Amino acid sequence: MRKGGLRIAIFHLAFIYSGGGEKLVLQEAEGLKGLGHEVEIFTSVVKRSNCFPDYIKKFQIKTFLPQINYIVENHESTLILLSCILAPFFSVRFRKYDVILAANQPSPWMAFWVKNFFGVPYVTYLAQPTRILHQRLIDKKTGLRFAKKTSGSLSTRLLGKFKPFIKWADEVSINNSNAVLSNGDYMKNLLEKIYKIDVVSCPAGVASPITGYRSLVTARDYFLLITNRHYGQKRFEYGIFTFSYVLHKNPNFELLITGEETEYTNSLKTLVNQLGLGNKVKFLGYVSEKELGALYRKASVYLYTAPEEDFGMGIIEAMANGAPVVAWNNAGPTGIIENGKTGLLAKPFDIADFSHQVERLISDKSLSSKVCRNAFNKVKSTFSLDNHIKLLDETLLKYAS
């Protein structure tokens, strides 16, 4: 280790949308720099206007290969695939780093070659198993995408044909990691089962300037809130149906949906119109972190509709900002929410029960207040960004060359 801190390279798939994984990588880089390390981020593709534009401008992000967006059609998937294929050849760029943080595949695959050729250790951080190999039911129903416009691209067809090699590459690169960290307990258990390795839970966290729960106590506005990327796997339609139920008893309520619009948004808007909710459901588009925090603090209930989410960053953000949460009693949310104490979990995937849990929080102010207070304290003790960075730092220091 060099005096004054480590020289750390962080690898990440791409920065092409505003997702929880992208935000976490940026927060990790910022946090590790704050501890005195020299940190650089490397990726396959960067689209700064599409990925937290008000935050990403603080970072210099380098790409593995030259960007070819005006030469090759569907360049995002092409660049990702080329980065994987050429990883052994550009691994020399990273020979002088003390350690690599490989954030989700194909990052461990790329880090594997740096370690193999130059002995640089790497720590793998996984929010999920490699999806092309280990698809969830929701992925099979809605389709699996890792970049825009990839469903029929050459890159996607090649990935399908070379699954045996991809399976080998996935296993060898994860098993050769110096350590594997997971995004929470649910994912730790799943990864250990799939890869037959020891995994350390290192859940993502939130950084909040709020010093105590009392500063969150404020008058609620009459709206339900959904935040997340607009993709079919998130199943926002569950929330829209829930809102239509809730509206019968609470006609003055609105449903607010944040996030950059996609093709999936069009189907949601069609559903809203079919249900006669056009003037009650508002699509706000991308909102800044400051605006998002204000929405959480004013929301009567935060709806987390994804049926098989690996973790649920929106849940943590809502809890940290004092919004009571309703989610499904399935997958990632079960590792975050203690039902009835820090949030409410509905029967999977019973919209009537989901609606009932939402109405409980609207009608019972005492329950809502208790849930919010317990949730805030849970975030401070378990899901703070400081805790995440501390464990990450300890692990990188342990294995750095």
Image (cartoon, helix red, strand yellow):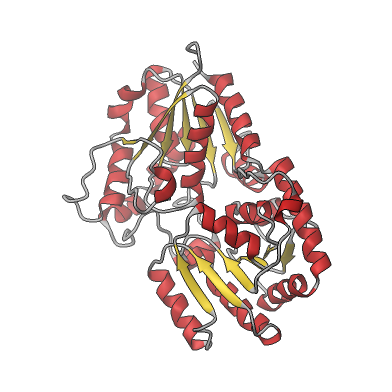
The image position of residue 99, as x and y in percent, is 47, 23
The image position of residue 117, as x and y in percent, is 36, 20
Residue 368, placed above or below residue 27: below
**Residue pictured at 68% horizontal, 54% vertical:** 319
Residue 375, placed above or below residue 191: below
Left or right of residue 357, residue 252 in this image: left
The image position of residue 108, as x and y in percent, is 45, 34
Residue 328, placed above or below residue 190: below
Residue 316, placed above or below residue 10: below
Residue, far top: 3
Left or right of residue 273, residue 372 in this image: right
Left or right of residue 358, residue 58 in this image: left
Residue, far left: 71
Identify the image quadrant of residue 114.
top left
- Residue 304 in sight: yes
**Residue pictured at 67% horizontal, 67% vertical:** 301
Identify the image quadrant of residue 250.
bottom right
**Residue pictured at 53% horizontal, 46% vertical:** 129
The total of numbered circles placed on residues is 0
- Depth check: give the residue in front, 353 or 58: 58
The image position of residue 151, as x and y in percent, is 34, 62
- Residue 176 in sight: no
**Residue pictured at 27% horizontal, 28% vertical:** 89
Residue, far right: 366
- Depth check: give the residue in front, 289 or 188: 289
